[in-house]
Image (cartoon, rainbow, N blue to C red):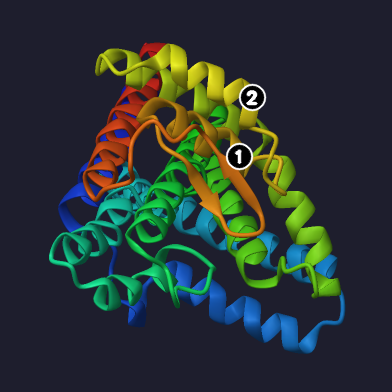
Amino acid sequence: MKSELIFVLVLALVLDRALGEPPDTWHPTVFMGRVIDLLDRRIGSGALVLLVSTIGFTLFSYAILSLAGGVFMLAASAVILKMTFSWRGLRDYTTPLAAAVERGDLEGARTWVPFIAGRNPTGLDTAGLVSTAVESIAESSVDSVVAPLLFFGAFSALSLEAGVTAAVFYRVVNTLDSMLGRPDNPKGFVPAKTDEALNLVPARLGAVLLLFSGALLRLPVGRGLRIFKRDRNKTASRNAGQTIAAMAGILGVVLEKGGSYRLGDPLAELKPRHIYEALRIVDLQIVTLTVLMVIYWI
């Protein structure tokens, strides 16, 4: 079974890097969102929406894997697992913003902000745009990649099917939180708290892996650790600040959301190059996690 787990994980990662995200018309997460929206309009309880959607999608995924056999089951596992994370997407949605800033096209860069962060792009200058992208890369490295892979790895101890469906479970909860987990939405309380609980370990492990990756790249990880310890709890979310603070410290920049938080020290002026540097660090973070998972299985 160990060789099967390694094969599925590596194939899923290769599929992601080679193909990226499918079109919205048949993207599983978009489909999840449509189902969740339908349930939200028909069910009065956020907890019940969470229960119905998680049970429905995990059972559906498990049924597909159970019906498939042999090589088909391995291929289906890799495809479903890939649909629970988005590694290449971190680059696909932030490098166009970086390129626009490099051209001096700030208005064009602002059009990419809604794809990566829930903030108003109007009036964002170069520093604000770059900060938004770097924050998104750091925070999304957890819920877009690290967390679903960790759930896959943890529950694969039971079976391959259990590992894949655990990753699906995480993705459903995270999608629910992104859709319903607003402070002004009473239905969002349970999904938001569930998502927060599921990310407690991945967020902190993700920050440690960022610091380790920074050390491998010969970046000032000591500074990163200092800022991480000082600023990681300054965000409203107990999880978001972990990786954002670590990234701010490694890069020697201030990452801030106006009126909400300000992490890091202004040792360098934010430039588009910091977006590419953040992507390089996160790429190594994910490779490191993959290697650790393979070593554990071996």
Classify the position of the C terminus by image quarter.
top left
Q: CA distance from mark 1 to mark 2?
A: 11 Å
| Residue ID for mark 1 | 241
**Residue drawn at the location 20% of the way across and 48% of the way down:** 17
| Residue ID for mark 2 | 230
Is residue 41 toward the left or the right of residue 199 in the image?
right
Where does residue 76 sit, x and y in percent of width and height? 34, 52
Q: 187 or 251, which lies in front?
A: 251
Q: Amino acid at mark 2?
A: Arg
Is residue 196 toward the left or the right of residue 149 in the image?
right
Q: Residues within 10 Å of mark 1 (few under 14, many from 20)?
A: many
Where does residue 32 sit, x and y in percent of width and height? 54, 72
Is residue 249 toward the left or the right of residue 170 in the image?
left
Q: Amino acid at mark 1?
A: Gly
**Mark 1 or mark 2: which is in front?**
2
Where does residue 84 sit, x and y in percent of width and height? 45, 53
Classify the position of the N terminus by image quarter.
top left
Where does residue 118 sit, x and y in percent of width and height? 54, 68
